[in-house]
Amino acid sequence: MSALDEARDKTGEALDVLYALIRTRETFGPDHSAAVQQARALGERLQEAHPPFTLQLAEGVAFRDKELVPLDPARYARVRELSRAAAAMGIGEIGVDRAVDEAGAQALAEGFGAALRGRVAGPPQVAGLWWAEALPVQWGVDAEQVDAETFARSQVALAVRDARRLRAAPSEGRRAWDFVAGLSCVRRLQEAVELDAIATVRALERAPTGWDAARRAASAACWGLLLADTVALRAPVSRAIAHTALVLACTGFDEQGGRGPQKAAGLCMPQVLASPAPTRSGISPHRLRVLGLLDAIAQGTPVVPAAPVIIAHSLERQRLDAQARPRARAALVAWLASRRPEDPWSRVLLATPGADTVVADTVVSAGPTSA
């Protein structure tokens, strides 16, 4: 983990501790031993986050120096409350010049706690911190409990980050596939798709980063989830399909195209087999599904769950044209469906959420020429 990634993780932990301190104060008061320990821990986490830095809060997401802070569903809910409290106080950005002491942590928690209860008295005065005004942010019109667009963007950004780490592993001397990191990447995408598939597709297609191999690998995993969900495959099978698509893409893609699915499967099998199996039985059901799919694809065996993996890989392999311009999602779907008009999976592909998505700066006319 890089120093910057570690600092972002510690920033997220500091937000967790702040939220816990607010709730402990409400229940037991500021003098309770747990509140005192949490106030000290908040200062320690901020120190470990390596100030100075700025923290931006906006409707359930947090950014450190405008870089996304890692979020899981539990932290998303906590940050959402903190961001609402900050907005009530007119705070959109918190400058952290140095770690706060115990008294400063208690004052910070008191200010945020009062804002959460609707008793807004302005930003708290804490030595080492400064405040900037909030930018206007609105909820998605269809979201009552969770802002789907914001959650999807955060999960997609973290999934692409995970894919970049997985692709970098062989160059850093780690030859075994990291099943934990791969499954984490898939689960991020799955949670976003379950909340709002269309929002997840939009987040993938509109991400500000270029279509490098890691982003196309994350997109291939998402294709696998969408195809599996469209035919109502069980969640464990969907995860295995997405994870297999991720393995193939991370191993087989280069910066513009890449190897076909069969060659990529043969290439990545040694990495997957070299991955340590921590369970008592030696192999988890998920790992067994992924290995089985990879073996079927490498051998050319026609098993049903392999089809969405092959389709996902083929689509993202053709994402960039000869001039490295990204093709629109709708163009990729139309191309593959036209090549396989009698294939039932072509009809499934056309029915996936967001299949007709076109965004700016994408090629929509000239389709790929080969699979």
Image (tube, rainbow, N blue to C red):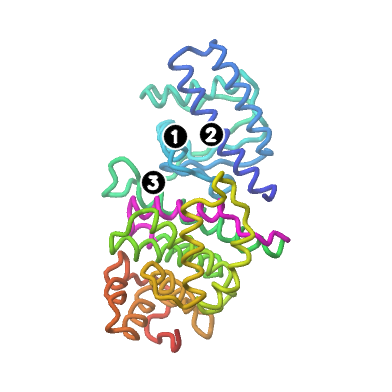
**x, y percentage for residue 208?**
50, 63
Can residue 196 be found in the magenta stretch? yes
Q: Which residue is mark 1?
A: 78
Give the distance between the C-alpha atoms of the residues marked 1 and 2, in whole angstroms. Answer: 8 Å
Q: Is residue 69 left or right of residue 139?
A: right
Mark 1: amino acid: Arg
Q: Which residues are magenta?
A: 173-202
**x, y percentage for residue 48?**
68, 35
Q: Which residue is mark 2?
A: 15
Can residue 250 be found in the magenta stretch? no
To which quarter of the image does residue 37 belong?
top right
**Label 3: few (<14), some (14–19) or many (≥20) C-alpha neighbours in 10 Å:** few
Residue 257 shows up from this direction: no
Q: Which residue is mark 3?
A: 137
To which quarter of the image does residue 251 belong?
bottom right
Location of the C terminus (image quadrant): bottom left
Sequence-wise, the earlier of marks 2 and 3 is 2
For the point 31% across and 49% down, the residue is 140
Q: Is the residue under label 2 in contact with that under label 1 (CB below 8 Å)?
A: yes
Q: Secondary structure at mark 1?
A: helix
Q: Is residue 105 above or below residue 313?
A: above
